[in-house]
Image (tube, rainbow, N blue to C red):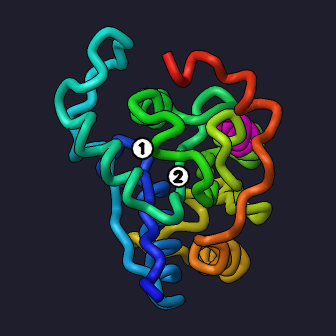
Amino acid sequence: MTRPHVVGVVGSLRDESYTRVGIERALAAAADAGATTELLDLREFDLPVFDADDREPGDAVDFADSVYDADSILLGTPVYHGSYSGALKNALDYCGFDEFEHKTVGLLAVAGGGFPITALEHLRSVCRSLNCWVIPHQAAIPRARTYVEDGELIDDDIEDRVVTLGEEAVQYANIEPDPACFESTENVGADD
């Protein structure tokens, strides 16, 4: 039996990203649970604004291949205007059913304020449209500047949530998916 492979996508472009801290901690927990891991830091990929007429510019193929090779995918995002980041949206636009269908996905959102839930709901909808199995447990880091210090989570409850997300990415990496969800059957543009 091979070890599950978990990738974590950092949907923030900031140098001092709280999202990166959260995803790195979740990946460390996944590694402790027996997975191989890979950090996909969007700052390190050349991903021009998605153009459906040119799906292979820059590092798009490398990014999509890394997602395709994963058993579980952790998506981390800062909350911008109540939703997930444009950088993450753009990266996800380079992927489709080939990369995500029947994969396990875990969600993490980071907010400057106290309400990161809508970003998680939006990401959950995107994942459902790609026929992923989204881990019911999700992690949020509200008021991040209060709970992250020197690149570490300093709140035990928040760290427990993030660690659980990484552990469940391994635990459910090979879960048998449900029949296709309604959203995925209506996602006709994905195959265009």
Residue drawn at 53 percent across, 52 percent down: 75
148 lies above or below 3:
above
Q: Is residue 73 magenta?
A: no
**In this picture, residue 27 sits left or right of residue 105:** left
Residue to which mark 2 is pinned: 76
Q: Residue 98, percent across and down?
A: 47, 41
- Quarter holding residue 113: top right
Q: Which residues are magenta?
A: 119-126
Q: SS of the residue at dot 1?
A: loop
| 1 and 2 marks in contact (CB < 8 Å) | yes
Residue to which mark 1 is pinned: 12
Residue 155 at least partly seen = no
Q: Residue 55, percent across and down?
A: 30, 22
The amino acid on which the numbered mark 2 sits, given as a three-letter code, is Gly
Residue drawn at 42 percent across, 69 percent down: 24
At label 2, counting other C-alpha atoms closer than 10 Å, the crowd grade (few under 14, some 14-19, many 20 or more) is many
Q: Is residue 121 magenta?
A: yes
Q: Distance between the Cα atoms at labels 1 and 2?
A: 8 Å
**In this picture, residue 123 sits left or right of residue 117:** left
Q: SS of the residue at dot 2?
A: strand
